[in-house]
Image (cartoon, helix red, strand yellow):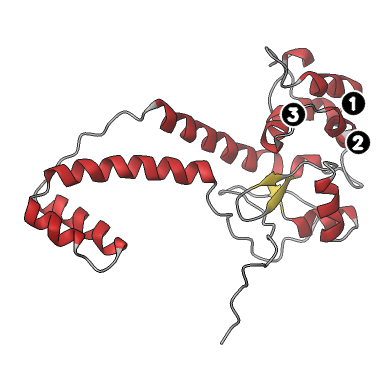
Amino acid sequence: MAPTASAGTRRRSRASHFGGKATSTASTRSRRSEPAPSEDLVEAFVLRTGRALARIAERIPRDRLLAAVGASTDTDVLFTSLREAAAIGAEIEPDKPDPLTEAFLRGSEMKRDMLKAEGGALSAQQLAEHLGITPQGLGRKRERNQVFWLDVGDGYVYPAFQIGKNGLLPGVREVLDAFTVDDPWMRVNFMLTGDQRLGGKRPIDLLRKGKIDDVVTAAAAYGEHGAA
């Protein structure tokens, strides 16, 4: 019998593509699974399905609702209620998502796009191999904010845009040092979004052209009130 993972097992890093293909000089021979849904995505799902189930419950006859509630598991309750809704022809008019749910959905979609952009995301093993260090060494770089990283719920991934021919793309360390924002998703968003201080160009594109000072200046101002 295979041993089960203990609660103290360290968080694992995974590469995430959400249908995209990561570009990396590191080995990609091992199959990488998609990371667990982010917390905001789960919360949006619960909000929307909860409203839908409430509308279904209002239309199911009391005796059938009692039978559904008496099911042995929560999953059985769900499937029984859905079968009853179909049986009685309950047509549920969809509600317009409330502003909070819409914000969750927009945020989740933005994160999904960031994980797919510019070659996708690399696992700790992939980036460590490219840098010629161990995953533990990469973990120390992450803790010191010396690489771009993202927390995807059950581990960390590393945007592929930051890799260069030999190690990290020149200027990455300087840009990370310049940031005044701590949120890793905001930092990645900055690199992938046109900035007015850079003439509407994306910081990552200018960094690849060697415009390190320009990107550092924009990064230092990113997150200030009124900043783009």
- Give the structural element (helix, strand or loop) at label 3: loop
Q: Residues within 10 Å of mark 3 (few under 14, many from 20)?
A: some
Pick the quarter of the image with the C terminus: top right
- Give the structural element (helix, strand or loop) at label 1: helix
Pick the quarter of the image with the N terminus: bottom right
Q: Residue at x 25, y 46 (%)?
A: 53
Q: Which residue is mark 2?
A: 170
Report the side of 207 relative to 185 (left or right). Answer: right
Q: Residue at x 20, y 59 (%)?
A: 69
| Residue 105 position (above or below residue 59) | above
How far apart are the two marked residues, 3 and 1, measured between alpha carbons? 19 Å
Q: Position of residue 184 (x, y in %)?
A: 71, 37
Report the side of 52 relative to 216 (left or right). Answer: left
Q: Residue at x 68, y 60 (%)?
A: 11
Viewer-nearest of discs 2 and 3? 3
| Residue 100 position (above or below residue 31) | above
Q: Which residue is mark 3?
A: 181
Q: Position of residue 96 (x, y in %)?
A: 31, 28
Q: Which residue is mark 1?
A: 212
Q: Amino acid at mark 1?
A: Ile
Report the side of 10 relative to 96 (left or right). Answer: right
How far apart are the two marked residues, 1 and 2, measured between alpha carbons? 8 Å
Q: Amino acid at mark 2?
A: Pro
- Give the structural element (helix, strand or loop) at label 2: loop
Q: Mark 1 and 2 residues: CB-CB less than 8 Å, in contact?
A: yes
Report the side of 73 relative to 198 (left or right). Answer: left
Q: Position of residue 155 (x, y in %)?
A: 66, 55
Looking at the rendering, which quadrant does residue 123 occupy? bottom right
